[in-house]
Image (cartoon, rainbow, N blue to C red):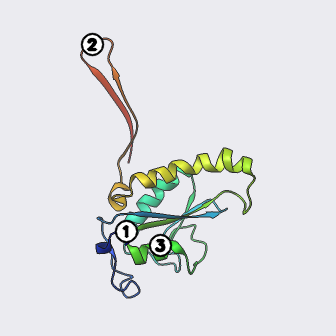
Amino acid sequence: NSLFPKEQRKRDPMKEMDVAFGEEIMGVYIDVHSSGGYTYYPWGHKNKVSPDDESLQALGRKISSFNQYKLWAPNQPDFLYPASGDTSDYMYARFGVSSFGLEIGEDFYESCKLFEEEIVPSNLPALIYAAKVAKKPFTLGKGPDVFDLRVSRDSAANERIRVSALASD
């Protein structure tokens, strides 16, 4: 058994690296590393975009909008170097899930105070967002997203309600 649907897997991931999974995939995998301030996504083992780059990039940018991290991905200005053996590449290729890595914090060993007061608060919203879109990450990650939805009774009119929200692209 698997957490990720068998029907979205490729029979031979190595031979099908250039075949897109498409918009209907399910699942998000996030590998958390220490220090760097980057969000990365496949392919990381070489500077070549994946066949689902548009969807991965859209979700990567959305995740980075919460923590202000730079994108470390193929053909991005902040692609530092190829990283072989990265689990985000494996999870994307093998299980067909939207896969990312977060390099959190400023140092390999963070103080508890910095971790609890800065790193967790800046990354938890990104992780919660990823969990919310896990059912269809390649579609939902492209937005729009509604944040801060508010419903209130309009005191000037007896039976009216007021709805307000903040939406992103």
**Separation of residues labelled 2 and 1 (CA atoms):** 50 Å
Marks 3/1: CA–CA distance: 18 Å
Question: Which residue shows up at 47% across the image and 78% down it?
Answer: 48
Residue, disc 2: 157
Which residue lies at the image location 29% right of the left edge and 22% below the top edge?
161
- Residue 140: percent from the left, percent from the top? 34, 55
The first of marks 2 and 1 along the sequence is: 1
With respect to residue 62, does 149 lie above or below?
above
Q: Is residue 5 left or right of residue 64?
A: left
* Viewer-proximal residue among 78 and 113: 113
Left or right relative to 62: residue 118: right
Q: Secondary structure at mark 2?
A: loop
Q: Can you give x and y, in whole percent of width and height, for residue 64 in the image?
A: 52, 55
Task: Give the image quarter of residue 152.
Answer: top left
Q: How many tags in the picture? A: 3
Amino acid on which the number 2 mark rests in the picture: Ala
Name the residue nearer the viewer: 64 or 12: 12
Give the residue pinned by disc 3.
42
